Image (cartoon, helix red, strand yellow):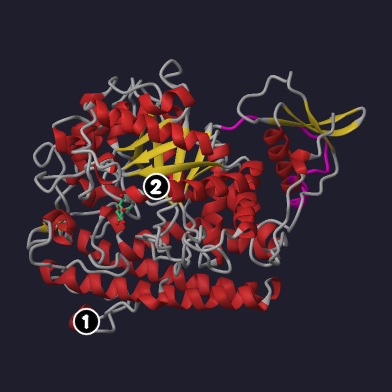
Amino acid sequence: MAIAAAVAIVGCSKPAENRIWLPDGTPDVNAEIVVDTTLDLKHDGFMIKDTPDGRKVMAKTDIGAMYGTYALQRLERTGKADGELDIREEPSYERRILNHWDNLDNTVERGYAGWSIWHWGEPVPVELIKEYARLNASVGINGSVLNNVNATPEILRRDYLERVAEIADIMRPYGVRVYLSVNFSSPAQLGGLPDSDPLRPEVQEWWADKVAEIYGLIPDFGGFLVKANSEGLPGPQDFGRTHADGANMLADALKPFDGIVMWRAFVYSPKSSDRACQAYDEFAPLDGHFRDNVLIQIKNGPVDFQPREPFSPLFGHMPNTQMMAEFQITQEYLGFSNHLVYLIPLFKECLDSDTYCKGEGSTIADITTGKLYPDVYNTTAIAGVANIGRDENWCGHHFAQSSWYGFGRMAWDVTLTAEEIAQEWLEQTFTSDPDFVEPVLDMMMTSREAAVDYMMPLGFHHIFAWTHHYGPEPWCDIPGARADWLPKYYHKADAEGVGFDRTRAGSGNVDQYHEPLASLYNSIETCPEELLLWFHHVPWTHRMSSGRTLWDEICHRYDRGVKKVREYQAVWEQAKPYVDVERWEAVRAKLEIQESDAGWWRDACVQYFGEFSGMPVPADVEQPERPLEELKKIKLDMKHHN
Ligand code: GCW
């Protein structure tokens, strides 16, 4: 049976050309589309097969057929559809979800691409939302949490829910389900109850009624995302209850409708001596206490989306609980939408990490796809914090789209390499001419490492400006601010050395990892240099594998990062003949900002840390141009960043 509905993808009214990776309109492929409900395919999987009757895209569901059609279109456009095709795909994760940190006043927390695409309080932008959903569908993203995890209770008001239902209706044909972030104190704040204690029957009843109301409007509503008892938000601990008490109460309300709870593990308290230990300390003891429709949503690293962190140790320690990874596609700590940083290598670094929780080969991908604990996982999920706004190119930087695209592709097939994903994105978005693709692909593939070098090399973390998270501010001191928000808490520079001692002699964080990692990280000799200052307080004179002292190596890494960005500028000059003027110029202008910012980071950090090391910037790296005192006065003009 050929099904039209599956491919009746309505195009958008704006010209899509030159803005996105997809051609406008319905995917036009050379195959028969077949939906056969008797096929044995999981979760909207599909097959593409050459048969004696011609080429067929086959699926069990119409959404599966749509995914197969997009997959074939991608193969055709990247020149991979010429030979005989015999493809069978089922997604690695059942739920592939974008988290929008969009507020009801249309601002976007950590958004660098303009106002919220949901246009709250304005007419529903039907065509825009269709195009958004179509882009998601083309890479297999099938869920959107519409609002900020810093949620206001108002989102659960009837008028907002009706609006959410309209959005859900627009996205449904593209297989994108809607989820909402909820505020734990909604029963008190919105419902007028005396409090929101999860064990209070009226509170449970309030949630049950609210959930029923939501499903009355949105029958395929996905569920709730919750940030609780974190950064000042309310939660079950306010009433002496645990995260499990809170999550389970919501899970019980959602269960009759097959809804899920994604309960975030991003928690930290000002009292802790090491913020990197917090999520583990609070959550690991609750393993096995969560309902089977709860997933614990864990940021890739134990602190907060830094350019490089080790993986969160929690992943290795909740064998009886469903867990999912949260990545940040928006570049809060990676140069906003000004820097070209392709993020899939960072995401894959986490997913490919071996936790050793069940011996060697226990990767985070294997845990979160349910492969390692099949009896525990009845659903699987992965989340990415969106970098999407009303900006004409959606993400503020043409190359930032590659991280949205790549998140979807990776969530669909976690075995794809970052390079494969980048290459197919480039070929669809620009051209497949190898003279363009090869150097630009190399630029994308090295861009994350370059950013680590010019911002926070060798395990440095959290040394950005407290106010905007954009530029360097390792010196930052804000009277009255929590210690664990300030850079000095993390770098701990002194006359002897620099870095956070998380060894057994220090905070003991290394022991939150399974062996052999715990001992590997614990020893300054075996700790990977990429994470050295994360786990160790290292003397300035420590000898690195390059033969340099730590101090010289720090200076070299910063310098290497800046030089890499200059190479990118040269690559982009060469790319000019292959790219339309508008996009070429936009990327060129952004690379100029990136080069200048990289120099700002380098000059600020080497001079600041030089005050502690007492050693000069080595002669074989570029000397800082502007004095530290001048760099300290730089105020960020946010209008360039939103
Ligand atoms: O890193 C911090 C961000 C906050 C964010 C928080 C979180 C949504 O600076 O803006 O709040 O993480 O992930 O909850």
Residue at position x 84%, y 33% from top? Answer: 2
Q: Is residue 180 visible?
A: yes
Badge 1 amino acid = Lys
The stretch drawn in magenta includes residue 83 = yes
**Lateral position of residue 386 relative to residue 167, left or right:** left
The image quarter containing residue 123 is: bottom right
Q: Quadrant of the C terminus?
A: bottom left
Q: For the point 9% across and 45% down, which residue is it?
A: 271
Residue 370 on image: x %, y %? 46, 24
Q: Which residue is mark 2?
A: 157
Residue 405 in the image, given as x and y percentages of width and height: 57, 51
On the image, the x and y values in percent for residue 451 come to 39, 62
Number of labels in the image equals 2
Above or below for 80 versus 413: below
Res 550 → quadrant: bottom left
Compared to residue 55, the image places residue 39 above or below, namely above
Say if residue 557 shows up in the picture. no
Q: Is mark 1 within 8 Å of ligand 1?
A: no
Nearest the eye: 85 or 278 = 278
Q: Secondary structure at mark 2?
A: loop
Q: Residue at x 58, y 69 (%)?
A: 392
Magenta part of the chain = 75-91
Which SS class for mark 1?
loop
At label 2, counting other C-alpha atoms closer than 10 Å, the crowd grade (few under 14, some 14-19, many 20 or more) is: few
Amino acid at circle 2: Arg
Residue at mark 1:
633
Return the disc, 1 or 2, that comes first in the chain's sequence: 2
> Seen from this angle, which residue lies furthest right?
53
- Judge by depth and name the residue closer to the eye, 251 or 85: 251
Quarter holding the N terminus? top right
